[in-house]
Image: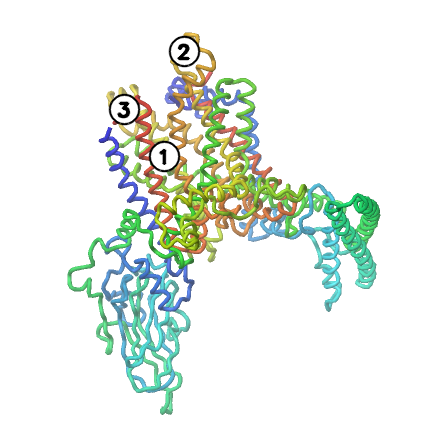
Amino acid sequence: MWSYVLRRILYNIPVYMGVILFLMLLLRLTDPVTAYLGKFPTYDQYNDKRTDFGLDKPILGDWQLGGRTWTAVQSEAASVGDTYLAKGPGTGAAWVQWSIDLAPGEYTIQATWPSVEDDEGVPRSLGESGLTWVRLIEGDIPLRTVSMDQTRPARSTEIDGVGWHNIGNVTLSRSEPLHVRLRDDSSAPILIDAIRVQPNRVRDAEDTPAPTVLDADASTEGIEIVNDPWTVGGFGRSLWDNQYVAALGRIVTLNFEHRSWSVPSQSVGEIMSSSIVPSLSVTLPVLILTTLISTTLGLIASFNRGKPLDRGVMFLAVLGMSISYLVYVIVGQYFGAQWPRLAFDLEIFSTFGYEPVLPLWSDVRQSLIDGGAEDPGWFRVLASWFANVPGTLASWPYYCLLPVLIGVIVAMGYDTRFYRAVMVEECNKDYIRTARAKGASNKRVMFKHMLRNALIPIITRVMISLPFIIMGSLLVEIYFGIPGMGQQLFAAITNKDFPVVEAITALLAAIFIITNILTDVLYAVVDPRVTLK
Amino acid sequence: MSGSLLDRKIEAEMAEGKVGWLKAVRRSRAFRTFMRDKAAVVALGVIAIYISIAVVIIGAQFANAVTRGALSDTFIVKELSLDASLKRVGPDSLPGFFNEPKPEDRLEHADSYLSRIERALSREDPAAALLAVTDAERGVADLSPDEIERLLEDAFDALDTADITFEDVDILREDLEFAREDLAAATTADDAEELRTQIDEMTEQLVEAEAAFESALDGLDDAVLALMPWPTGFDGAVYNARLLLGTDSQGRSILWRAVYSIRVATQVGLVSAILAVVVGAFMGATAGFFGGWVDHAIVWLYSTLSSVPYIVLLTVVAFVFGSLEVTVPFTDGVKVSNTLIPMYVAFGVTFWIAPCRQIRGEALKIRSLDYVQSATALGAGRFYIMRRHVIPNVLFLVFINFSLIFIGAIKSEVILSFLGIGVIGQPSWGVMISESKSEVRNQFFWQIGTATAFMFGLVLAFNVFSDALQDACDHKHAR
């Protein structure tokens, strides 16, 4: 038995690792940081968010295209000279910098890179998102840091057949050199072919001097190429120092302390724990009621197999299944909550909103402190919490009963059909015939023999729906304004609140796998026929 | 215990070349069982009707695209285009079957017509501007601008009368409400008696006022009709058809939108089902048949994907693909996020698991059956066994899964469209149902009713069809 349990657990470890990998790759198809901040963040905003959640690390090992050092790529795609520089995303520790002595005046700085279109060997396949940062420095004073969107070809202006991207204008007042520095803290690969400095107005000069083009080539004067010290000395960044291992670590150690991006006052864990009770207050009653009603209906239908009653129930089930969930929710809300209010002035159910069904621990504690207790022990808080339960539970019918009824109606069609099929299967078994032959009454056959054996698929189905219980019912929660897990997840998705999305999906998958293991084990315990293979 | 679509005998005859595919299928027991089920045959007919409507819509648009818009003025092509379902054809939220809207709405509708004509008259070229005031076939009467102006003045007078009578009704209603509240709070019998007589009086007044309002509204409607006559003849028939099931909150024809949605639903259902079934069947058959590490890898893959709750997977995939800034190949810059592609991907990723799992199980079982074992012993090759024994025996699973995924895709489309990550920029049943949520709060059920009825027909047909298919292919329950 124990070896069976162990085997199930071991089997599910690679599955769970796959889930995390899949979610991670899926959520990083677009750069989470630019998705959250929009196309034009400032450098500090961008970098804060990126380092905040370890997004500057490689996703999985050191495999990113372009590598972790600046590489000169000899290519036809280079329009200035015959090479360009390329580098994979990094932490900001590596850069390439051009220094040029300029007279005080106003200059336009431009850059060019091989465009995405002519990508012969151009490492741009991952570069569908992310910004490249350019820092302009006069002497040792940084003027500003500007972003370049390298997902598009450089083509603000075209000079001699080369498209240039305008980085920006700088006004130099002191006779110090200008440094143009490209940093590698991007979520995408960085490419640079050349920098161009176009004088606009130069003080103390009669004619405007000619523009300077600085090629991205190690032999260019004033160029300085700095690589990430971690990768240059031969001992790379540790193999385990990547986003994948970090995400696995967070879920294994149940570390949900990270701040949410869109609601910085709350941590991921707080958001999740505050939404479990609202979810459960709808889904748990739905599960219990549906299972009770539909097993009964299934039992009755299977017992009258082929008779009008069975046909009628099954026909209703199919009719019910053919209507969209959303229609039930919309129409159910109108006839359950709004219509009684308009027609009879009855306030039975709420249309939108929620009040805690169980008292909040922190509220209870606070009220005890307000009541004069210095530092109430957990026992006193617990006692007070229990004393508060009836009061808060009284708000349950007003906010949650209607969603529960809708959920039961929706789920009933599917469940009744399933349980009927299960019972019909059992009806045909030999032991039922034997029981009848022995002269057992209908009631005895139904409840004593059949129901007990049919319990196995029932238990399986109930267990399988457990993760969905925690997940809550997305649609109902959004429509009725119940702040459950489903609603929180959807809000996080639309707000691009990356830490919350990742944590909730990972947690849901973990719960799903744990219930799977439990189902297998329970199945084996309940049904002695299952060989523990 | 389930079986092939074909009987062994027919299968053998077919292998010898005596009977063709079609005949073999027609003579099979599964086919006969299926045809005995009258409901299933009707369901099949309903599905055929839906799909042929979708084919006509796609065909018309395709023909128009191939001829570079040469057909765009043809009646059928014009009415089946996306524009026809996005166009304003009448006042907002008009009930279906030409039921009268609520009095307040009638007032508002007349007001909007009159102000549109007034604005047109104030233009530099009133005659041309008046021609542009149309709701599909219904346009301004063919009169000179001066005459229109005269009619408009009359109509505005009628509008004022209606407005004033409406105000009377409103005030009386409010007073009545207050009086009733007072009555409820009355303490002495005398007060109550007095209030009761008051209420009776007011009720009488209200009935009168309402009658006056009603007749004023009728007058107003006549005045508007004089300005914008109801189309007659063929145009009239088309216009009546447009308004048959009412209009939505933006004055678009609900019937037109619901019919156009058949195309979207069929497209979503077919593409997702084909995608999921082909991928699932291929993966499942490969895993079940080859076993070993291939099996392990495929089982790992689908266990992984199915460990994310289905609605979460659907939402996240649709959202991520909808926010990718990628253009569709072979088009001039159409963004992927504006197409149905994110939904196809989401459904494909989610729905292939069920057919894969079932077909793998079935293939595993078939592989260990005696006759397959003996075929192997006789020296039959892997691919021969696959073609001869495995594929025909799992084919029924493919069909059943196809129709189940079709249903799943159509129903999930509604949820995704409600969440704003489904169909964008064109009507679909999901879009219609989610748009009708505010209409339902105003007791307007025509849009949600129409969309649900259209969807109900198709989904019910598929439900009945897949049940019958399951029964027909399940030898154990076959009679």
State the image quarter where residue B163 is shown.
bottom right
* Extreme-top residue of the structure: A438
Q: Amino acid at mark 2?
A: Ala
Tag 3, which chain?
Answer: A
Tag 2, which chain?
Answer: A
> Which type of secondary structure does the marked residue at label 3 adopt?
loop
Q: Nearer the viewer, mark 3 or mark 1?
A: 3
Residue located at (54% from left, 25% from top): A313
Residue located at (27% from left, 24% from top): A531
> Which type of secondary structure does the marked residue at label 2 adopt?
helix
**Residue at which label 3 appears:** A531
Residue B329 visible within the image: no
Up/down of A31 relative to B479, above or below: below
Tag 1, which chain?
Answer: B
Local packing at callout 2 (Cα closer than 10 Å; few below 14, some 14-19, many 20+) is some
Quadrant for the N terminus of chain B in the image:
top left
* Number of callouts: 3
How far is disc 2 from disc 3 in space, using C-alphas?
A: 26 Å
**Residue at which label 2 appears:** A435
Q: Residue A172, position in %: x, y?
A: 35, 84
